[in-house]
Image: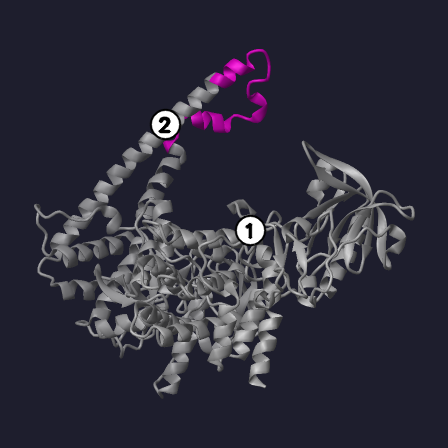
């Protein structure tokens, strides 16, 4: 019986060469034969031989041939046609006149009689019996329909539908919208009822899975099916089934992609170019980018790579190892579907058993481990990451932390932000801290926390892209995230330095409400901490690194906009009623020209005056800071930080995270705080609105920081639950950071609202 099983298997697979042109390699140029070459008769033909003309010329074409004695799997891919008249057709579901777009020397529309049956869409010269059939589009599960759209109607005056078949597409037009929709619905309904088309590669993968414990059968499968093995020739059609049609109606049309089927064939050509490429990284990045944009192609590329790493003539050459290097990059970027994943794992084990202690064995082992960890990536791996993966090494990631200091960590393509946070805590001795930490994407003007589950490799690629686009430096920073217990932080610990540096960041950004005297005192303590005692020869940081710059600007602008600061002519113009302005007339253009020139000159003068006043004000503030710096002479670095934080702690919101929101609740000037224990629920009510329910009150906020607020609020609740689980005193009203507070700041500040995010409690 086992031998009979093998014989049956071999016989049922002989027909795959029939599809070589469209679903595999090119077997013969002019014809394909369904036969077993070992059973040829003396005249060179087998008893059951069926010769079919090239499928690429017959599928969905207008000149058909008869195919007899072909198996069901062939019928799903090869079109059966004949010259039957209209009266011989099966039951018609829809019929009527439609215009079809015909392409020749120019595009034109011709009127035909269309008839839709359960198996095909045909068109005839007319509706009368015996009318000649001019073309057929056989409907399978891979066909697709593009519905009518307004843009085409505006351009042509007709509603259009497009039906994609295996080798042709029909662009059909009608003046009536309802008629177009009726045709589209009917055709789509038939497509949906069709059984899924399977390619020879899919059938072979299934047979390999069923016989994976029988090496003899598996070997026969590979030996008698070239489509599974390495080839130097081109691929004429995908290994897996893809819907017919283009990407013109999809999001990715702007990237220059063709149809998915076309892109699959192009990708195989790219794979073959790897063998001779001097620099493979750009090709690898291109393949990965296409797979990122066109998700269905991921399984196809995996199948192509398995094919090109099977039965290779020179498996140990550098050219052949390029396929393994791309397969390594794919395994760290995308996971294949379940069926292809099983096939890939079987292939890797087979290679390891056939070539132990080889480079292929090493790559196969690395890929197997990667498949256990891989999550779908958001970015294509960077040049550096691809180079590291090609050599199966880890990357170095630079993480900055307050000081400014930094350290380097070894990461893989699978390392998450949470894992890096834990590594940093261990490296800096912060494992026992009651506060929580996070990674931030940071530039000179902007920062955002990185989600704990985010892949660091994606984050680094994103930062590199931002740097090239914005022309400013971006870095990955490790910082305090939730300040749950500021009082227990030792003055000599690095965590105290974190607290000091992040507090100063808030001061410079204007997020710490304080009077001018306190801000100048903070600036002087900052200088003492950085530079030591005052010296006329010591270079010190610019003012914008010590003092909130927007406060300086606001003060100068207010002084310049005061009525007494305006030029007399402008004051007079303000008092002049509209009716007294110059009337429109012959001189209006001249008067307008002079007025525009005068306005421009006035604006230039105002800008110069503003810059001048800003310099004067900055010099005055800096002078005051330097005088205060002299007054703190003798303070050690530790004393300076302690004095700085003492002033900062005077604000009740010390340790909180600030977000700018528009606040809608009762009186506009209300100042309130809500302990977490009073919050019933919280969440996002729409794209820009955050909602908190505290007791019987609903509070709504308009903000663009919804995600950040939600993440931070969740972190606070998680930390509080952990503290309660440890039996600690989790008094959530102990510090300002464990409340949701709403504060309107001083009028010189922006109306910034102190607040923490939420989730259903």
Image quadrant holding the N terminus, namely bottom right
Q: Is 617 on the left or on the right of 686, as rendered?
A: left
Label 2: element kind: helix
Q: Is residue 699 magenta?
A: no
Instruction: List the single residue furthest toward the top.
Output: 586
- Relative to residue 516, is residue 312 depicted above or below? below
User: What secondary structure is the magenta-colored segment mainly?
Assistant: helix
Of 492 and 76, nearer the camera is: 76
From the top left corner, tell me how far across and down residue 710 is, in percent: 47, 67
At x 7%, y 46%, the residue is 537
* SS under mark 1: helix
Q: Earlier in the sequence, mark 2 or mark 1?
A: 1
What residue is rendered at 22% in x and 54% in y?
A: 523
Please say whether residue 590 is one of the residues in the magenta stretch. yes
Which residue is labeled 2 in the image?
604
Horizontal side of residue 75 vs 325, given as left or right: right
Q: Is residue 578 left or right of residue 634?
A: right
Label tally? 2
Looking at the rendering, the stretch of residues picked out in magenta corresponds to 565-593
């Amino acid at each position: 019986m086992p031998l009979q099983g093998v014989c049956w298997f071999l016989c049922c697979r002989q027909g795959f060469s029939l599809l070589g042109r469209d679903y595999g390699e090119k077997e013969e140029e002019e014809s394909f034969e369904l036969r077993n070459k070992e059973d040829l008769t003396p005249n060179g033909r087998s008893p059951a031989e069926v010769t079919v003309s090239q499928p690429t010329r017959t599928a969905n074409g207008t000149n058909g041939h008869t195919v007899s004695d072909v198996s069901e799997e062939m019928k799903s891919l090869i079109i059966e046609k004949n010259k039957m008249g209209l009266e011989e057709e099966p039951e018609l579901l829809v019929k009527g006149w439609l215009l079809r777009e015909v392409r020749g020397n120019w595009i034109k529309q011709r009127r035909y009689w269309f008839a839709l049956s359960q198996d095909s869409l045909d068109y005839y010269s007319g509706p009368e019996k015996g009318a000649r059939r001019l073309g057929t589009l056989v409907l399978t599960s891979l066909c697709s329909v593009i519905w009518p759209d307004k843009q085409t109607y505006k351009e042509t005056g007709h509603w259009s539908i497009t039906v994609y078949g295996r080798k042709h597409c029909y662009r059909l037009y009608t003046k009536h919208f309802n008629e177009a929709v009726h045709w589209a619905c009917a055709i789509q309904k038939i497509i949906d009822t069709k059984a899924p088309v399977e390619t020879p590669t899919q059938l072979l993968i299934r047979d390999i899975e069923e016989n994976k414990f029988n090496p003899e059968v598996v070997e026969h499968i590979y030996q008698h099916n070239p489509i599974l093995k390495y080839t130097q020739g081109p691929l004429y059609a995908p290994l897996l089934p893809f819907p017919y049609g283009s990407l013109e109606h999809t999001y990715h049309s702007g990237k220059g992609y063709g149809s998915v089927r076309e892109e699959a064939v192009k990708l195989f050509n790219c794979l073959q170019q790897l063998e001779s490429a001097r620099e493979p990284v750009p090709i690898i990045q291109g393949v990965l980018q296409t797979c990122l944009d066109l998700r269905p192609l991921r399984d196809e590329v995996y199948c192509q790579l398995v094919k090109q790493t099977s039965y290779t003539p020179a498996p140990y050459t550098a050219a052949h190892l390029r396929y393994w290097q791309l397969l390594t990059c794919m395994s760290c970027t995308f996971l294949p579907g379940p069926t292809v994943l099983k096939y890939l794992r079987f292939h890797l084990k087979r290679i390891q058993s056939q070539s132990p202690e080889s480079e292929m064995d090493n790559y196969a082992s690395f890929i197997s481990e990667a498949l256990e960890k891989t999550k779908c990536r958001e970015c294509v791996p960077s040049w550096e990451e691809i180079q590291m993966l090609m050599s199966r090494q880890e990357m170095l990631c630079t993480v900055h932390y307050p000081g400014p200091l930094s350290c380097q960590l070894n990461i893989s393509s699978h390392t998450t932000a949470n894992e890096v946070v834990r590594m940093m805590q261990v490296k800096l001795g912060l494992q026992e801290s009651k506060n929580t930490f996070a990674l931030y994407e940071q530039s000179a003007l902007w920062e955002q926390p990185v989600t704990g589950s985010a892949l660091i490799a994606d984050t680094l690629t994103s930062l590199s892209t931002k740097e090239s686009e914005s022309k400013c430096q971006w870095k990955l920073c490790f910082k305090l995230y939730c300040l749950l217990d500021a009082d227990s932080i030792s003055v000599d610990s690095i965590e105290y330095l974190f607290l000091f540096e992040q507090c100063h960041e808030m001061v410079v950004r204007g997020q710490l409400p304080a009077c001018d005297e306190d801000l100048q005192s903070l600036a002087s303590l900052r200088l003492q901490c950085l530079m030591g005692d005052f010296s006329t020869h010591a270079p010190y940081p610019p003012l914008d690194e010590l003092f909130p710059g927007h406060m300086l600007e606001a003060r100068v602008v207010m002084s310049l906009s005061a009525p007494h600061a305006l030029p007399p002519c402008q004051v007079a113009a303000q008092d002049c009623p509209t009716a007294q302005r110059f009337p429109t007339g012959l001189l209006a253009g001249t008067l307008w020209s002079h007025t525009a020139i005068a306005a421009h000159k006035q604006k230039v003068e105002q800008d110069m005056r503003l810059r001048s006043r800003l310099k004067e004000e900055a010099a005055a503030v800096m002078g005051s800071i330097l005088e205060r710096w002299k007054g703190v002479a003798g303070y050690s670095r530790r004393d300076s930080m302690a004095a700085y934080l003492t002033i900062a702690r005077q604000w009740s919101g010390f340790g909180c995270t600030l977000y700018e929101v528009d606040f809608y609740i009762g009186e506009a000037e209300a100042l309130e705080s809500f302990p977490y224990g009073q919050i019933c629920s919280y969440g996002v009510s729409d794209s820009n609105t955050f909602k908190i329910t505290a007791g019987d009150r609903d509070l709504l906020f308009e903000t663009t920081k919804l995600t950040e607020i939600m993440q931070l609020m969740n972190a606070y609740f998680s930390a509080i639950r952990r503290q309660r689980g440890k039996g600690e005193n989790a008094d959530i009203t102990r510090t300002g950071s464990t409340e949701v507070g709403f504060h309107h700041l001083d009028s010189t500040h922006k109306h910034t609202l102190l607040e923490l995010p939420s989730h259903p409690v």
